Amino acid sequence: MIASKTPLSILKQLIAIPSQNPMGHEPVGDGWYEAGVSRWLCEFFKEHSLPYEYHEIESQRGNVVARIDGDPNRPTVLLDAHQDTVPVAGMIVDPYDAIEKEGRLYGRGTCDVKGSMAAMLATALRLIPLNGDHAPVILSFTCDEERTQIGAAELARRLALPAGQRSALLPENPQFAIVCEPTDLNVVVAHKGTVRWKIRTSGAAAHSSNPALGVNAIYKMAKIVSCLETYAVELQSGGIVHPLCGGRTLSVGTIHGGASVNIVPEVCTIEIDRRLVPGEVAEEAIADVDQYLRKNCDADFEFLPTDTISNPLLDRDNATLCQRLIEAAEPTRPNRQAIGVPFGTHAPRVAALEIPTVVFGPGSIAQAHTKDEWIEIQQLDEAVEIFVRLLTAT
Ligand SMILES: [Zn+2]
């Protein structure tokens, strides 16, 4: 029975269970949140007699954690995959009835990141018959990666608890962590982070027939936007470049101002997206923009509270893990590389606990979040071989 559970058959089952992340919007209709996938995972572990826990965070959202005990002389490895997918709206393939075609499997989450989840579960089934002759493994399935990362935050909180308060399946921290995302089976040792916030200018409303009676918030913002355009250029040419991830960027993404064409606008707001290179700290990046505007722009403004902080992943202590993964991949998919990527993940939350962490998984980020999302089936099988080789290496 176990033998019939290929990563492909597991993935098809996972794709059939919607777990859309509403991305901060009010969900309309069915198929939202991770509860269905969580229930399926708990059933899977029950069926295969592996100890598991469900850590509820809020209604319909929580993490599933399972454990496969192994040889205590080998390093414990945490494998993580997120349960949520981005919404299915606009897809041109059936999001839930996964179709196989020309070596690919199509459907929402095939690539990001239920493919990796299926590979993790197929790996677990390969380890069970080895009766502990492998590294101890913690499997974590976190919620809400695509939006606010409450799942990874909860996992990190539990991993930071002192002995005595920890859950039975997390008695001590893993020595290594692999956060699964589509990397084409390369090993991501560093990635950029993101910080987003709003800047607001305020004026005074007046009838547009006599604008001198008001103060135009859009005119103030125009000065700020112009100043930020210059800042963004200076930032990129400013010399701080990570060898794997590239340079720092800043982009003004939205602007909203004014209530009506016949009123002098009272308020104008812009949203800033600043990409952090490994080693940068979000608060310092925000403070630098503040300082620059105060020095170079004569308009008054205010910074609103930060909307998003997603930290960069640092290639500081993960070289050994990276090397082991590359070696494990060599017989199956040779010439894997240590790479840096511009997209963020929730891996830094685990890495912050001084657990060497990399990002790795089957599939390409080019197919994540797309209207015809797919994964190369061969990569699924290869991911299992790589995980098994890594975890059984002595
Ligand atoms: Zn993902």
Image (spheres, rainbow, N blue to C red):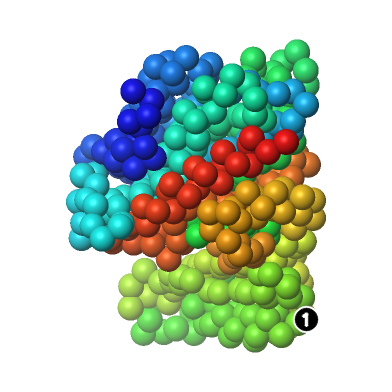
Report which quarter residue 179 is drawn in: top right
Seen in the picture, residue 176 relative to 59 is either above or below; the reply is: below
Residue displayed at 34% across by 23% down:
1
Report which quarter residue 193 is drawn in: bottom right
Residue displayed at 50% across by 35% down:
123
Q: Is residue 52 left or right of residue 115?
A: right
Residue displayed at 40% across by 43% down:
114
Q: Nearer the viewer, residue 216 or 95?
A: 95
Residue 51, x across and y down, in percent: 53, 16
Where is mark 1, residue-wise?
Answer: 239
Q: Nearer the viewer, residue 119 or 129?
A: 129
Q: Is residue 250 left or right of residue 60?
A: right
Residue 53, x across and y down, in percent: 52, 19
Whether residue 310 appears in this view of the structure is no
Q: Secondary structure at mark 1?
A: loop
Q: Nearer the viewer, residue 44 or 287?
A: 44
Residue displayed at 49% across by 78% down:
218
Seen in the picture, residue 369 relative to 5 is either above or below; the reply is: below
Whether residue 12 appears in this view of the structure is yes
In the rendered image, the quadrant that contains the C terminus is: top right
Q: Is residue 177 left or right of residue 261?
A: right
> Which kind of residue does numbered mark 1 sit on?
Gly
Q: Around disc 1, counting alpha carbons within 10 Å, would you say few (fewer than 14), some (14 to 19), or many (20 or more)? A: few
Residue 214, x across and y down, in percent: 49, 77
Q: Is residue 19 left or right of residue 356?
A: left
Q: Nearer the viewer, residue 26 or 104?
A: 104
Residue 299, x across and y down, in percent: 64, 78
